[in-house]
Amino acid sequence: MDDTVPMTPRGFELLKEELNQLKTVERPANIRDIELALEHGDLSENAEYHAAKEKQGHLAGRIDYVEDKIARAQVIDANPAELDRVRFGTTVMLSDTESGEEISYTIVGEDESDATKGLLSVTSPVARALMGKEVDDEVTVRVPKGTRVFEVLEIRPAA
C-alpha cells in the first residue's frame, strides 16, 4: 500500500512552517501557561491548569500529525513541459456548459485544499474527473447538487 501524501511544494513549505510555529512558539507558550497555573496551587479546582494540559494534548497531537505528513510527503511540482493534460499541481480553467460560468481550479493535496480559494483536493470528485483531460475535453461530474458538465478551456502551472 502506498502511504505517501501527495502535495505541492507550497503545501510542503506551509506544513514545515506550521511545524516550526507549533514547536517554537505555541508549545513553549503552553509550557509557560502550565507552569503559571501550577503556581496557583490546588490542581483539583484549577481551571487554568486543566485547560493548559488539554491544550498540551492538542498541540502534541497536531505536532505528531504534521510530522507524519512531512515524513510521508511526496512533493510534486507540475512540469511546465507537461501541460497537455490536467495533472496534480496544475491549474485548469473550466467553463460550465450550462451556465457559461468560468471557474479555475488548482489540483492540490488533501491538506492544501480549500474549495473557496479554488484549491481542489486530488481526491475530490471534481479533481478525479478532471485528471488526464485535455483542452476542449468535456467532463461530466456528479456533485451533491446533481451533475455538471464542464469544458476544459486552459491548463497552466499552478500560480
Image: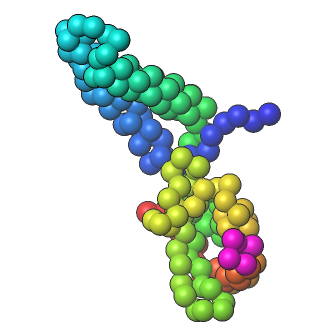
Q: Nearer the viewer, residue 88 or 100?
A: 100
Q: Position of residue 104 (x, y in %)?
A: 52, 74
Q: Is residue 98 above or below residue 88?
A: below
Q: Nearer the viewer, residue 143 or 150?
A: 143
The magenta span reads: 141-146
Q: Nearer the viewer, residue 46 or 157?
A: 46
Q: Is residue 75 above or below residue 97?
A: above
Q: Quadrant of residue 126?
A: bottom right
Residue at 20% over, 11% down = 40
Residue at 67% over, 83% down = 151
- 125 displayed left or right of 108: right
- Residue 137 shows in this picture: no
Q: Quadrant of residue 81?
A: bottom right
- 3 displayed left or right of 156: right
Q: Where does the N terminus fall, quadrant-wise?
A: top right
Colour scheme: rainbow
Q: Position of residue 98 (x, y in %)?
A: 66, 92
Residue at 29% over, 17% down = 46
- 84 displayed left or right of 105: right
Q: Position of residue 138 (x, y in %)?
A: 73, 82
**Majority SS type along the magenta span:** strand
